[in-house]
Amino acid sequence: MAKRINFFATKNDMVSILSKLEEQFSHGLKYVQCGKSERISYETANDIPGLGTLKEKHSEISFLIMRKDEEVTANQSGQVYQGDNPRSLEFDPSGISEDGKGMIHGMFAVMEDNEISDGLLKAVKKILNSECKKVRGWYIGKEAESLYGKLRFICIGLSEPEEYDFKIVELEKS
């Protein structure tokens, strides 16, 4: 059964959150980029180039967070996806749009229930609960929260009408 967590976060927010996740898994983690023929992986979130920047929409780039010792399986085309690697946590980074006008949401997700993916999701959720503000089920990183009102908080893509943007009612009152 698919489970997901939506969030808004800057690069600094994501590195802080994911560094805490990396510390919890002593055997090590890796971030494997999805949808590529060549195998691209990183040892830490801080190693991911361009983290915190997106062109214009959600899910432009996606990674599988996996235990370092876990085998990566590619599909018949040689591409890596979560469906072929159920013992993983999908990570679609959040980021500021290239034009600087919007903060585009990110997501953590699992497709199948198993000890590894559920453990990763549970650990991320615990970190998010301690590191972020939670508004209507969405997590907002500390630095991202400081950008509310300066940037659009985009749920789909930059070209969508502003009425589809995420609104943080609690912050508008303060």
Image (tube, rainbow, N blue to C red):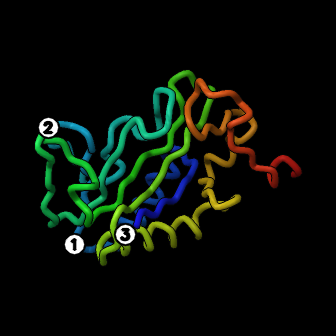
Marks 2 and 3 in Cβ contact (< 8 Å): no
Q: Amino acid at mark 2?
A: Glu
Residue 131: percent from left, percent from top:
58, 64
Task: Name the foreground residue: 29 vs 157.
Answer: 157
Q: Quadrant of residue 20?
A: bottom left
Residue 10: percent from left, percent from top:
53, 44
Label 3, on which residue? 120
Task: Name the foreground residue: 75 vs 155.
Answer: 75
Residues under labels 2 and 3: Cα distance? 25 Å
SS class, disc 1: loop
Asked whether, in this view, residue 126 is left or right of residue 82, the answer is right
Asked whether, in this view, residue 93 is left or right of residue 33, the answer is right
- Dot 2 or dot 1: first in sequence order is 1
Asked whether, in this view, residue 32 is left or right of residue 133, the answer is left
Instruction: Name the residue: 67% across, 34% down.
Output: 152
Q: Amino acid at mark 1?
A: His
Q: Residue furthest front?
A: 1
Disc number at residue 27?
1
Q: In the image, is residue 61 above or below residue 122?
A: above
Label 2, on which residue? 38
Instruction: Name the residue: 46% across, 32% down.
Output: 54
Disc number at residue 1?
none
Instruction: Name the residue: 72% across, 33% down.
Output: 150
- Dot 2 or dot 3: first in sequence order is 2
Instruction: Name the residue: 74% across, 34% down.
Output: 163
